[in-house]
């Protein structure tokens, strides 16, 4: 049954793509030549100048393992002062629930955490600031209640890379 439907459909497709004479007869005729005596010339537009690539600057200075820039909505993982991973996009706290700025140490981690205050899942949580502030998987389209939201893949990478007592710096 399927073959009976496929063969006519394939024939129709081939006929429509082949430019057969009957198909050409259905096309509109070309427009008549212009009777205007004005001559127009086309000039090519100038080739656009290459634009510089905007590279986010690393705003953290302390010997730390993770850096967060709230103004740039970016985070990095560092190793021996050099960027190991990132920058990656983040979202952070909203008004009334700001993400604290400062230098912190990872206090604890929980791969399958659920917020005790909001009842929301916080996969791959890495807690680093007082008040339950953590890196964790969360939407990158909306602000948080103070935590640093990361995409699912990035949250897993940060979770694996940040041991307890690792330094985290958050800058405005």
Image (cartoon, rainbow, N blue to C red):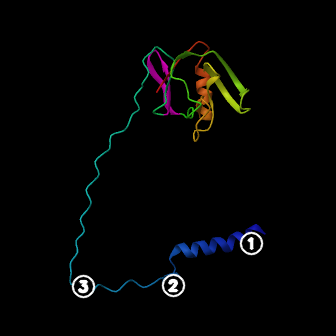
Instruction: Pinpoint residue 45: horizontal percent, then vertical percent.
Output: 27, 60
* Residue 82 drawn in magenta: yes
Residue 66 lies left or right of residue 57; in this view the side is right
Spatial distance from mark 3 to mark 1, Cα to Cα?
55 Å
Frontmost of labels 1 and 2 is: 2
Instruction: Pinpoint residue 140: horizontal percent, then vertical percent.
Output: 58, 38
Name the residue located 57 percent from the left edge and 76 percent from the top edge: 15
> Which residue has dot 1 on it?
4
* Residue 78 drawn in magenta: yes
* 62 is higher (above) or lower (below) than 32: above
Instruction: Pinpoint residue 118: horizontal percent, then vertical percent.
Output: 71, 32
Judged from the image, the secondary structure of the residue bearing numbered disc 2 is: helix
Frontmost of labels 2 and 3 is: 3
Q: Give the mark nearer the N terminus: 3 vs 1.
A: 1
Frontmost of labels 3 and 1 is: 3
Viewer-proximal residue, 122 or 31? Answer: 122
Neighbours of disc 2 within 10 Å: few (<14), some (14-19), many (20+):
few
> Which residue has dot 3 on it?
36
Q: What stretch is highlighted in magenta?
A: 73-89
Q: Name the image quarter holding residue 134.
A: top right
Instruction: Pinpoint residue 98: horizontal percent, then vertical percent.
Output: 56, 29
Name the residue located 78 percent from the left edge and 69 percent from the top edge: 1
Residue 26 image label? 2
* 33 is higher (above) or lower (below) than 127: below
């Amino acid at each position: 049954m399927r073959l009976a439907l496929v063969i006519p459909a394939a024939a129709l497709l081939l006929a429509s793509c082949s430019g057969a004479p009957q198909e050409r007869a259905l096309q509109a005729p070309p427009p008549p030549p212009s009777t205007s005596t004005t001559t127009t010339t086309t000039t090519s537009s100038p080739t656009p100048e290459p634009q510089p690539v905007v590279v986010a600057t690393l705003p953290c200075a302390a010997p730390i393992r993770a850096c967060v820039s709230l103004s740039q909505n970016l985070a990095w993982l560092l190793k021996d002062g050099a960027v190991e991973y990132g920058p990656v996009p983040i979202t952070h706290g909203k008004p009334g629930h700001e993400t604290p700025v400062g230098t912190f140490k990872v206090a604890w981690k929980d791969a399958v955490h659920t917020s005790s205050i909001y009842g929301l899942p916080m996969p791959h949580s890495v807690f680093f600031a007082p008040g339950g502030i953590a890196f964790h998987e969360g939407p990158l389209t909306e602000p948080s209640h103070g935590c640093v939201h990361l995409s699912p893949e990035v949250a897993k990478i940060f979770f694996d890379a940040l041991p307890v007592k690792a330094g985290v710096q958050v800058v405005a």
